[in-house]
Amino acid sequence: MISTARHLADGREILYFDSEPTARDAVDTRDLPPVSTRSQVRWDALLGEWVVMAAHRQTRTFLPTTDQCPLCPSSPGRATEVPEAEYQVVVFENRFPSLATGVELDVPATAPGAPLTAVRPGLGRCEVVCFTSDHHRSFADLGPERARLVLDAWAHRTEALSALAGVECVFVFENHGEEIGVTLSHPHGQVYGYPFLTPRLEKVLDRVRRHAADGGDLFAEVLAAEQAGPRVVTANEHWTAFVPAAARWPYELQLFPHRRVPDIAALTDAERDAFVEVYLDVLGRFAHRFEEPMNYIASWNQAPVHQGRDEWWLHLQLFSFRRAPGKLKYLAGSESGMGTFINDTDPEDVARQLRAVQLP
């Protein structure tokens, strides 16, 4: 993998990732104003969680037509976020970031009239990862070589964002499908560098430590049990993909490497190749389970930057809101109000369905 760093007209960094040496000298000719970010993070005293406030994102691009897609390569007469006329994989700083390194640092200690609601600057970084210059492709049909290049780019950005001052965890993810909430249909994902541990990481790490205090290894035991159970969908020498026994989503998979590693960057070449094999397999099953490809969220669970790295076990969650043809799982009263999921499918049956999908 070869990475080439350049800058856009407003000073944001853009990085091209290529499988072989490629000149990347195109210049962003747009007249762009500087990025203005007013993000804050505020402490929810009742839940003990940080909430990101990013009101400036209300003006971000929303569902443009294909001919106005800002993630497609630039062409004569139409400059986009990517100055080059073509690319393999490209990463750039989000123009409408929830968190940023250039955010206003002088913020009040607490929210107005709320002395228990601590306020901090929305310090961090948000990046966009474009998987291909082809607007009409999806990750499922990238092919092994391009998917591996994307994985290497994810590893590169995980290391880079982990090194930023103030970043506590790095989240790599893809939202796929308009029903998920995607506002740009071009095949892409994102990388967030948070200035705090997310609630999921904190909760899982706490459970791992409680289990260790009783002499157990929670991650290892969960993986071993699932590998021997009825919910495995596919596996190879280095990875197992299974429907979790307590799945929250109608269609949900977790992909675990067989070796404990903290993050994507720690995977060996053999483990990266093996991941691509398993991941493209399960994405194909999601794409062909129903007549229409399923919407999904792919969510990497990586170790915190500064704590618990030896205790963590990298894994990927892949889940869809689709519960049946023409039917979505909505987060209604129980899920949104109380945080208690009610699943409309049976994990063992979902695993059987996905194993039975005939891949083209």
Image (spheres, helix red, strand yellow):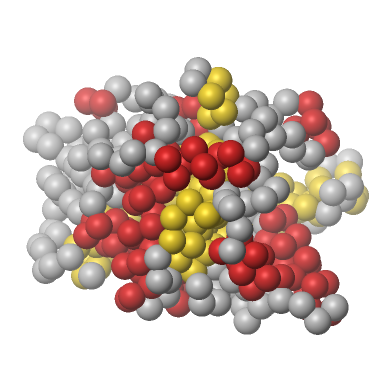
* Image coords of residue 311 (percent x, y): 66, 78
Q: Name which residue lies at 62% across and 43% down.
A: 347
Q: Name which residue lies at 33% across and 55% down.
A: 91
Q: Which picture quadrant has residue 208?
A: bottom right
Q: Which picture quadrant has residue 274?
A: bottom left
Quadrant for the N terminus in the image: bottom left
Quadrant for the C terminus in the image: top left
* Image coords of residue 309 (percent x, y): 62, 78
The residue lying toward the viewer, choosing from 61 and 218, is 218
In this view of the protein, can residue 40 be seen by the observer?
A: no
184 with respect to 27 (left or right): right
Q: Name which residue lies at 89% across and 47% down.
A: 46
The residue lying toward the viewer, choosing from 169 and 288, is 288
The residue lying toward the viewer, choosing from 355 and 308, is 355
* Image coords of residue 282 (percent x, y): 41, 48
What residue occupies the far top of the structure in this picture?
326
Q: Name which residue lies at 11% across and 63% down.
A: 22
